[in-house]
Amino acid sequence: MSREKIKVTLSILDNNYPLMCEAHERNLLIEAAELLNGHLQDLRSANPKLPHDRLIVMGGLQMAFDLLQERQTISREVKTVNQTTLRLLEVLKEAEVD
């Protein structure tokens, strides 16, 4: 089953980047580019003398760091939910025996 590729042009820091993606990925890719662009513009405003390449590296590093923090938070929350579920199942089993 082949998936149709479409062209999408993303604008980041006043530069256009034409990319090919699958049709169902288009909106998420645009949203990701807008998020990156906004983050880089904020970083550029706060550090106007920062060279372009460093700006992009720092912005990417900050976003990757934020992503890893979110993953850790989600992992802890999933662990808590799983532990609670196991405790509830134990209580239900004990209630069935009684």
Image (spheres, rainbow, N blue to C red):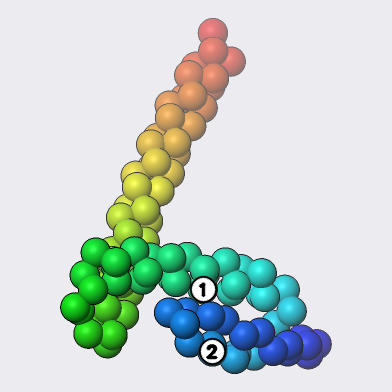
**Residue drawn at (53%, 88%) of the image:** 16
The quarter of the image holding the N terminus is bottom right
Q: How far across and down, in percent of the image, does residue 98 sit?
A: 54, 8
Q: Within the image, what quadrant is residue 95 found in?
A: top right
Whether 16 is drawn above or below 35: the answer is below
Q: Extreme top residue here?
A: 98
Question: Which numbered tag is attached to residue 22?
Answer: none
Whether 69 is drawn above or below 87: the answer is below
Residue under numbered circle 1: 33
**Residue drawn at (40%, 48%) of the image:** 74
> Mark 2–mark 1 contact, CB under 8 Å?
yes
Q: How far across and down, in percent of the image, does residue 17 sit?
A: 54, 89
* Tag 1: amino acid: Ala
Q: Nearer the viewer, residue 88 or 56?
A: 56
Q: How far across and down, in percent of the image, does residue 76 sit?
A: 34, 44
Q: Nearer the viewer, residue 14 or 22?
A: 14
Q: Secondary structure at mark 2?
A: strand
* Tag 2: amino acid: Tyr
**Total numbered badges shown on the rendered structure:** 2
**Residue drawn at (23%, 73%) of the image:** 48
Q: Nearer the viewer, residue 65 or 57?
A: 57
Q: Secondary structure at mark 1?
A: helix
Residue under numbered circle 2: 17
Q: Is residue 45 visible?
A: yes
